């Protein structure tokens, strides 16, 4: 029986030695894996530090560009306001010139009709288009000896401007 106990103890000792051997192998493998993970984390940290620096630099540049753009926009704002105001003035000027032209043409037309009625001549021609009427009226005003020189010059200028505008639009 002693021998069985001795063999059992020896067997337990051998099994324990084998168990310790495989446990050491497993722990060494785990240690190598942890070393690799640690090394990877160090590399990731270095990469993150580099990226952080680059991101901060990019953000600074973006802020500088934004400030520059805002500065330029503030400088352009008065120009845009001036262009807007110029457009409004030109619109008002165009409307005023149009109203004056219509008024002058109507006055000339009425005076021309009154003169024709006084002479006893009635006009029974087909009505003219507004552009044709302006042309006829302006030529009549220029060639009419009774019309003052300034009015004739203005009417001629308006006619030329209307003709140029019509050509420009087409």
Image (cartoon, grey):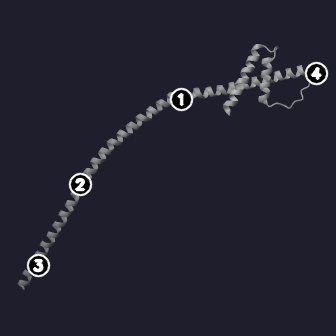
> In the picture shown, does residue 80 fall above or below 48?
above
Residue matched to label 3: 11
Tell me how far mark 1 sits from mark 2, CA to CA: 57 Å
26 is higher (above) or lower (below) than 155: below
Q: Which residue is mark 1?
A: 77
Q: Position of residue 101 (x, y in %)?
A: 75, 24
Out of 35 and 166, give the one closest to the viewer: 166
Lower sequence index among marks 2 and 3: 3
Q: Residues within 10 Å of mark 4 (few under 14, many from 20)?
A: few
Mark positioned earlier in the residue sequence (4 or 2): 2
Give the residue at the far right of this rendering. 120
Cβ atoms at labels 1 and 4 below 8 Å apart: no
Residue 126, located in which quarter of the rendered image? top right
Residue designated by label 4: 120
Of the image marks 4 and 3, the number of the one nearer the N terminus? 3
Give the SS element for disc 3: helix
Q: State yes or no: discs 2 and 3 in contact (Cβ < 8 Å).
A: no
Which dot, 1 or 2, sits closer to the camera?
A: 1
Q: Of circles 1 and 3, which is in front? A: 1
What is the CA distance from the residue labelled 1 to the residue labelled 4?
A: 64 Å
Please tell me whether mark 4 sits on a helix, a strand or a loop: loop
């Amino acid at each position: 029986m002693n021998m069985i106990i001795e063999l059992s103890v020896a067997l337990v000792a051998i099994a324990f030695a084998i168990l310790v051997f495989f446990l050491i192998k497993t722990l060494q493998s785990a240690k190598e894996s942890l070393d690799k993970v640690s090394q990877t984390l160090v590399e990731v940290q270095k990469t993150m530090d580099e990226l952080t620096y680059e991101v901060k630099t990019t953000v600074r540049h973006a802020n500088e560009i934004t400030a520059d753009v805002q500065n330029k926009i503030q400088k352009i704002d008065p120009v845009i306001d001036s262009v807007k105001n110029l457009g409004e003035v030109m619109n008002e000027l165009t409307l005023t010139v149009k109203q004056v032209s219509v008024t002058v043409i109507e006055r000339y037309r009425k005076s021309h009709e009154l003169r024709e009625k006084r002479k006893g001549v009635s006009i029974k021609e087909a009505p003219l288009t507004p552009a044709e009427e302006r042309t006829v009226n302006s030529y009549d005003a220029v060639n009419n000896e009774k019309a003052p020189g300034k009015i004739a010059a203005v009417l001629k200028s308006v006619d030329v401007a209307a003709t140029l505008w019509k050509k420009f639009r087409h």
